[in-house]
Image (spheres, grey):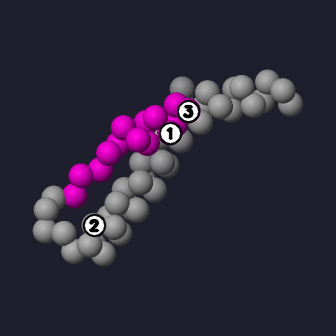
Amino acid sequence: MIKLLVIMSLAGGVLTALMLVRHRLAKSGKELEIPYGVAIAFGGFWLIAERFLNQFG
């Protein structure tokens, strides 16, 4: 469970940084929206994939 939280928070931080750069380059006047569901899904898929891939090693 701790590993999921760490992966999720790192993915969320990277996603936020990328979205912020994109928002500033586009010079958009509207409010920045961050899709944190993507980071949560990434963390979950990472752990699921890790369990299946480590099963063969």
| Quadrant assignment for the N terminus | top right
Task: Decide which of 17, 27 is in the foreground and name it.
Answer: 27
Residue on which disc 2 sits: 23
Residue 4 seen by the camera: no
Q: Amino acid at mark 1?
A: Phe
Q: Amino acid at mark 2?
A: His
Q: Residues within 10 Å of mark 2 (few under 14, many from 20)?
A: some
Compared to residue 45, the image places residue 10 above or below, namely below
Q: CA distance from mark 3 to mark 2?
A: 27 Å
| Quadrant assignment for the C terminus | top right
Q: Residue furthest left?
A: 29
Q: Which residues are magenta?
A: 32-45
Q: Is residue 21 magenta?
A: no
Residue on which disc 1 sits: 42
Q: CA distance from mark 1 to mark 2?
A: 22 Å
Which residue appears at 35% of the width and 69% of the height? Answer: 21
Q: Secondary structure at mark 2?
A: helix
Q: Residues within 10 Å of mark 1 (few under 14, many from 20)?
A: some
Q: Amino acid at mark 3?
A: Phe
Which residue appears at 75% of the width and 31% of the height? Answer: 53
In which quadrant of the rendered view does residue 22 lie?
Answer: bottom left
Task: Decide which of 47, 9 is in the foreground and name it.
Answer: 47
Residue 45 disc label: 3
Compared to residue 55, the image places residue 7 above or below, namely below
* Residues marked 1 and 3 touching at CB (< 8 Å): yes
Q: Earlier in the sequence, mark 3 or mark 2?
A: 2
Q: Is residue 41 magenta?
A: yes
